Image (spheres, helix red, strand yellow):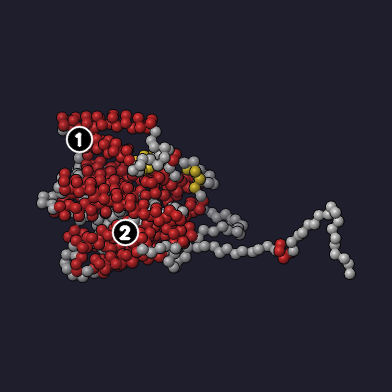
Amino acid sequence: MQNPFTPKPGDRVVRRPRESEMAPVHARVERREVSVRGPTSPMMLVYSFFAVALVGAILLSLPVANSSGEFMSPIGTFFTSVSAMTGTGLIIVDTREHWTAFGETVLAALIFIGGLGFMTGAAFLLLITGRRSSLQGRLVVGAGLDDNRLGTIASLARNIIMMAIIVQIIGAILIFVHWYVVTPMWDGMTLGEGLWQSVFTSISAFNNAGFEILPDEYVGGTSLTGLSNDIPSLTIIGVMILIGATSYATLANVIDVRGLRGWRSSRDRPSRSSKQRFVSGMAVLLPIGILIVVASMYVDQNLLRIVGITLITAVLFCTALAYLVRIKSWRQLTLDSKLVLVGTGIMLLIGLIAFMTFEWDNSKTIGDEPVERKISQAFFHTVNRTAGFSTIDYSSLRSANLSVTEGMMFVGGASASVASGIKVNTFMVIVVSAYAIFSGRERTRVFGREIPRVNVHRAMAVGATATGALSIAIITLFAVQPDMDFRTGVFEIISAFGTVGWSAGATQHLNDAAKIVVSITMFAGRFGPITLALFMAGREQQETIRYATERVRIG
């Protein structure tokens, strides 16, 4: 038998692993998808809101909720509940005359919960029920809030809820001071009526709902028609509408709030030069406003007086606000915020120009009004494109203006806001990507940043799906109610999808089947786009196999 190997001096022993130890380790990682069923599915959140709408419909059908003291039709109460939950504002009965204080409270609660939005509302429901969300559930909520940091989702949702409550409280205080203290809405208005009117209007305005409980016999018209000459009321309501339709994410990215202990860091503190420019600007604008007001007393021009008072109020408000907040520079903003701000500005500009161009000499709307009321009506109509308050009869708008209005309603507000539609973010991505295609560029670039191709594909899918859903809803509406005017029916469906609430006179004449169609359209418009986006985000995957390309004729 041969002796074992004996190393000699200077030899090195090299040990190699056995082949079994060198075998590769195969690990299978399953791709995570957002399921269409189960508690972590976005559809579960839709079901939750649908359940809340059903509960609201049941409460509204009770005799205690309406002035007649009888049980209401379930279809009518479901229509009203969905309209309030989605923040639409379409009504089949007069809100003040038909509903009691209990019914109005139910409507206010539905508006508040629905206005929190798809993702924030889901987090809010979890908070008030005391349930803890799972890891995948937090990922779903975070995707809707555009923040995937697990540790900040709960605090982010809490901040959004607190912001909504604070803004609505401030709005209610301002409305109460104006409607009850400074200029009472009607003679004999009690303190309780003033408080409830202020609270309900503030909730409806911030959540872009369009509901109101003002007495027509005192105010002088349905909705806000009697307030068409009340510039302070329209300004307060308009600002609240804009804040609600802009979203917390955009506002938080634009504004730095000063805490009780000062700014968080020296970088957040305004520079000395910016302070000097601000003080100089306010020192120049304040005397100009005072001079305009004084001049209006001699020439008796109401328009000059309104401009002067507005300028003085803006200066004082900006001075007080400058101590609490700091507006970030354009370079510090995220691409999402830039697209929202630019897109909102474009929509406001288009709406303002279209309204003043097509309705300036229309005697059925603003043609017989003085210049200052024409301007104020145009501004409020443009800002109000996501809410649905009306200061004019929309059945009297000219067809060209109706078409522009339908386009604005279809786009809606910002993502994760109280507004609906396909969202300004989606619209801007589609516009920018179309411009890139027409320019011959393969990649979509804007503001020095490139938009990922997957975002472009999702935006295109949301826009195409929304267009297809609108087409189906319009066809279904005319199938169940063939005698409806085509122009009026199309406007009604687009208003329902955008959860705006403007009506050209068709809502009161809908039959039961048409009410169901419009209710489904309102629900789809409120929760459809974000649900679709979440499904696409949850099913994103990297393809390992690519097929041979083949061109297809376009156009």
Q: Around disc 1, counting alpha carbons within 10 Å, would you say few (fewer than 14), some (14 to 19), or many (20 or more)?
A: many
Q: Position of residue 489 (x, y in %)?
A: 30, 59
Quadrant of the snapshot with the N terminus = bottom right
Distance, label 2 to label 1, CA atoms, is 40 Å
Q: Is 355 left, or right, of 254 in this rendering?
A: left
Per the image, label 2 sits on a secondary structure element best described as helix
Q: Amino acid at mark 2?
A: Ile
Q: Residue at 76% across / 60% down in the picture?
A: 16
Q: Which residue is mark 1?
A: 305
Q: Residue at 87% across / 65% down in the picture?
A: 3
Q: Position of residue 54 (x, y in %)?
A: 30, 67
Marks counted in the figure total 2
Q: Position of residue 49 (x, y in %)?
A: 35, 63
Q: Residue at 42% across / 51% down in the picture?
A: 426
Q: Around disc 2, counting alpha carbons within 10 Å, would you say few (fewer than 14), some (14 to 19), or many (20 or more)?
A: many
Q: Quadrant of residue 142?
A: bottom left
Numbered disc in front, either 2 or 1: 2
Q: Which residue is mark 2?
A: 113
Mark 1 or mark 2, which is nearer the start of the sequence?
2
Per the image, label 1 sits on a secondary structure element best described as helix
Q: Is 162 left, or right, of 445 in this rendering?
A: left
